[in-house]
């Protein structure tokens, strides 16, 4: 797949700021930013919500990161998986376990709670959603109401970004390779898009 809407030039004061931050964060300006630059208010809204979401602290960060990666794997967004591996590496999360998310059912590296979170992320991402009362009740018992609400919102945001990226043809840009991580694991039955 290739990008379906060609990137445009990132211009203006805000553009200069975005490019500076991107270069500091990634070492370069991702091509996907040029795609989203066609509608700066949409880009700003998505970035603002993503930044707010990072500040939430009622649910464990590892669980939220794993959930986002599970959505990316399930939907087939190589860009999000790539970026989340990069972010996990930079945040000191266990990247060896993160790499196993696309094949979490077969992997033995996840705790029972992590498996429930990964299953919940996929259930929310299904069309129609396949969430059960039992899933929510179990997570509520283990994490509490505030954490489940937060986790659910993180998964919802992950669906927004992953589905948008896939629809626009935005794919991996090699962020994980910059951290010298192994190639992304493939979800069984799905060809690699990285």
Image: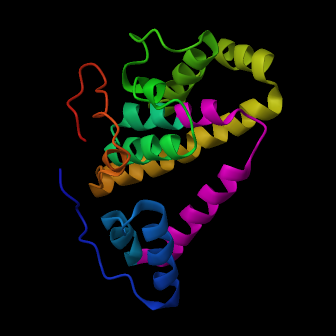
User: Start and end of the magenta stretch?
Assistant: 39-67
| Vertical relation: 145 (above or below) 137 | below
Residue 108 seen: yes
Residue 74 in the figure: left or right of residue 154: left
| Vertical relation: 4 (above or below) 34 | above
Residue 54 colored in magenta in the image = yes
Q: Position of residue 19 (x, y in %)?
A: 44, 76
Q: Position of residue 111 (x, y in %)?
A: 59, 12
Residue 130 seen: no
The residue under the point 70% across, 32% down is 60
Nearer to us in this view, 146 or 58 = 58
The residue under the point 32% across, 82% down is 9
| Vertical relation: 185 (above or below) 53 | above
Q: Quadrant of residue 153?
A: top right
Which residue occupies the extreme bottom position in the image?
A: 12
The residue under the point 46% across, 29% down is 98
Nearer to us in this view, 131 or 58 = 58
| Vertical relation: 46 (above or below) 41 | above
Residue 134 colored in magenta in the image = no
User: What secondary structure do most residues of the magenta stretch adopt?
Assistant: helix
């Amino acid at each position: 797949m290739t990008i379906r809407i060609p990137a445009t030039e990132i211009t203006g004061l805000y553009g200069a700021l975005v490019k500076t931050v991107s270069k500091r964060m990634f070492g370069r300006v991702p091509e996907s930013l040029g795609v989203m630059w066609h509608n700066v208010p949409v880009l700003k809204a998505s970035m603002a919500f993503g930044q707010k979401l990072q500040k939430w602290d009622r649910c464990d960060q590892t669980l939220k990161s794993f959930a986002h990666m599970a959505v990316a794997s399930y939907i087939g967004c190589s860009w999000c998986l790539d970026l989340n591996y990069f972010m996990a590496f930079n945040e000191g999360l266990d990247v060896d376990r993160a790499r196993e998310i696309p094949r979490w059912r077969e992997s033995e590296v996840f705790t029972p709670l992590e498996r429930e979170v990964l299953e919940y992320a996929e259930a929310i991402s299904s069309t129609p959603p396949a969430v059960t009362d039992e899933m929510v009740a179990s997570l509520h018992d283990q994490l509490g109401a505030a954490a489940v609400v937060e986790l659910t919102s993180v998964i919802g945001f992950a669906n927004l970004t992953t589905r948008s990226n896939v629809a626009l043809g935005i794919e991996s840009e090699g962020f994980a390779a910059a951290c010298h991580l192994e190639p992304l694991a493939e979800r069984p039955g799905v060809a690699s898009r990285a």
